[in-house]
Image (cartoon, grey):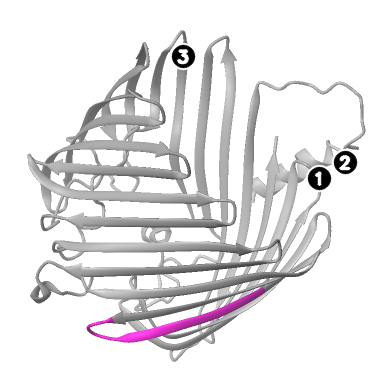
Amino acid sequence: MLGVLFVLMVQEGAPLESPRSSEPKDVSPIHGRLTAKYRARWTGSDRDQDLYELLTLDASLAPEVTGALSARFAEDLDGNRSVAGRYVFDSLDDSYHRGSTARLYAAYVQYEAHGTLARIGRQPAEVAEAVTFDGISLREQFDGIVVSVFGGKPANLFESAVVRDVTGGAWIEGAPWPRGRVRLEYLHLEDENLFGLFRNDLVGLVLEQGTGPLFAWGRATALEGEARDATARLTLTLPELVVDAQGLFQFETIQALASGIDPYATFLLPVEPYAQATLRLSKSFGERFTLDLASTSRKLTSRGDEGTYNREFTRWSIAPRATLHARLTVSASFDFWQSTADDFWTLGGEAAWTAAKDFTLSAGSAFTLWTFDAFTGEERERVRSVYALLRWKLNRELSADVRASVERNDIDTFTTVEVGVKRGF
């Protein structure tokens, strides 16, 4: 509840500011946002209440010295953490067997001047893989060429001990011709978990080029000296038409790895080699109607390798959107999935009404013929959901939203109410 109290206290001392006010404003060295969300969920037999708070800060500490902080706090308000047997609202936060948990995503201080950047603390590694580490990074620019090195200990949020874990790497990039970019990345990870100690070295090459309305991007990686995957993307942007095509090919079987390189393969089944192609199209018909189309197809290199998390499939998606009135917008979505095991479809729709400049109400409904819950391993059929969302922007810094939803499936009826507040400062 501390986050809610903080929001209310700050708001109490900051009356609504007139957009025409000509009084000078104080320039604060600290800027950020605090988001607090209360969530209540219940079924016919179970219930759960939680409070989530997300704090982000940017601070000017001295000339050329800045700092940043990003943290999440969660509090279980009703204490259902040691439920005997199956509990439908289980979560990672409940596994700690205490009411309050915290996650520190980033906390660092950096110095930047004359093309040099030095950063120390918890920070993201500036490579494509989602790796956060506690350590040091240095970046230097030389006549259009940027070079960076980093190293430290991986910040694995869900591991209790990271004594033997180490990470490090480097990247270099440049723009050798107009609208072009070349980037070479290297990442080393040593990660010890329940399945052993993993040492992985990943090298990535990124190429991109723009010409007129076309933009091309590609990335290829090698793991332990062997080709791992390759991705290519081509985007065409015209005044009323956007076409995006993407292809991905995975060359080798992905099994247990350091969690920073692939956090899922370590705990799920191996992912066998496959090729996947996606085509997206967005077309505007004047100012009132837009149509989005998409198709994705995945084919395994060997069809005999299909598994629970490794299937061939084709997905078709249609999403029209229309502005019926200056304050009323309606949209719909239809998805059809074809796989070797099952075919299923989903259908949904939403209407959004802007009652005032800073007040929006939206409501929608969706029907899913069949869905799979990856966390519980349960299959759910004929899932129906209805929701309503209210957004209210009180002033430039403060906004609130309320969301209520009801989902009915062949297991139970799930009701969720969320109340959120965002405060910028």
What range of the chain is rendered magenta?
339-350
Q: Is residue 243 left or right of residue 149?
A: right
Say which amino acid is labelled 3.
Tyr
Label 2: which secondary element: loop
Which sits earlier in the primary sequence, circle 1 or circle 3?
3
305 within the magenta span: no
Q: Nearer the viewer, residue 38 or 329?
A: 329
- At x 57%, y 16%, the residue is 61
> Can you give x and y, in whole percent of width and height, for residue 197 in the image?
11, 44
Contact between marks 1 and 3 (CB within 8 A): the answer is no
Q: Position of residue 208 (x, y in %)?
A: 34, 37
Q: What residue is shown with label 2?
A: 16
Residue located at (25% from left, 68% from top): 298
Name the residue type under label 2.
Answer: Leu
Percent across and percent down for residue 290 are: 61, 66
The span from disc 2 to disc 1 (Cα, nearest Å) is 7 Å
From the viewer's perspective, is 246 left or right of 240? left
Mainly helix, strand or loop, the magenta region? strand
Q: Which residue is mark 1?
A: 395
Residue at the (41%, 43%) spot, across then down: 215
Q: Is residue 102 visible?
A: yes
Question: Which of the two residues, 201 or 211, is positioned nearer the viewer here?
Answer: 211
Q: Amino acid at mark 1?
A: Asn
Residue 98 appears in the rendering:
no
Locate the C terminus by quadrant: top right
User: Mark 2 near mark 1, Cβ–Cβ under 8 Å?
Assistant: yes
Badge 3: few (under 14), some or many (20 or more) residues near its Cα, within 10 Å?
A: some
Query: Label 3 belongs to which residue?
Result: 111
| Quarter assignment of residue 370 | bottom left
